[in-house]
Amino acid sequence: MMNNKKGLSTVVTTLIIILLVFIAIGIIWIVIRNVLEGGVTEIDYANKCLAVSIQVTNRACSGVAGNQSCNITISRGAGGDPISGVKVVYSDGVTNNVTDAGATFALIPLQTKTTTNIIVGGVAGTVTSASVTPYFKDAQGVEHLCQ
């Protein structure tokens, strides 16, 4: 009869170590892949944003400070993909208020649009400037703001 159990124990131990190494490699790969895919998505939207040229060409606000109604005209230059919308940033020189102009300003290149009666709250003084930040939406509806 054979009483040599050392050989069996060494084989089992080696297989367990190899299995643990494969599991560790799998976990590390999943983390690295998610980081790389997220970075690629952000680079893609940043690249789209570089081609977008958009600006406020006309701003007219009325009403009392702190509760004003503004009409703005936004123009878009040539190039780039159609954007999903814009965020309009109103300022009185001290405080800012961000308003989502939304689908009203889903501009294609070389297009100009005007929106009326945007209520600007949160700005203590009279609105002195307005700027825009375009954004794109992904398949899940998440907004990716351009810088």
Image (cartoon, rainbow, N blue to C red):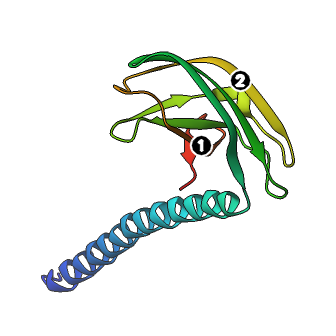
Depicted 70 relative to depicted 8: above or below: above
As rendered, which of 56 and 62 lies closer to the eye? 62
- Name the residue at 64% across, 28% down: 102
Q: Name the residue located 56 percent from the left edge and 40 percent from the top edge.
A: 143
- The percent coordinates of residue 124 (x first, y second) are 34, 25
Image coords of residue 97 (percent x, y)? 42, 32
Q: Is residue 133 above or below residue 21?
A: above
Report crowding for label 1: few under 14, some 14 to 19, many 20 or more residues within 10 A (C-alpha): many
Q: Is residue 79 above or below residue 94?
A: below
On the image, the x and y values in percent for residue 114 come to 75, 28
Residue 18 quadrant: bottom left
Three-letter amino acid code of the residue under disc 2: Thr
Secondary structure category for the residue under label 1: strand
Q: First in sequence: mark 2 or mark 1?
A: 2
| Residue receiving disc 2 | 115
Q: Residue at x 59, y 43 (%)?
A: 132
Q: Which mark is residue 132?
A: 1
Q: Is 61 situated left or right of 27 in this image? A: right
- Return the residue nearer the eye: 104 or 71: 71
- What residue is shown at x 56% (from left), y 29% (from top)? 100
State whether residue 94 is above or below residue 22: above
Using a 10 Å C-alpha cutoff, classify the residue at mark 2 as few (fewer than 14 neighbours), some (14 to 19) or many (20 or more). few
- How far apart in space, not on screen, are marks 2 and 1 (Cα)? 13 Å
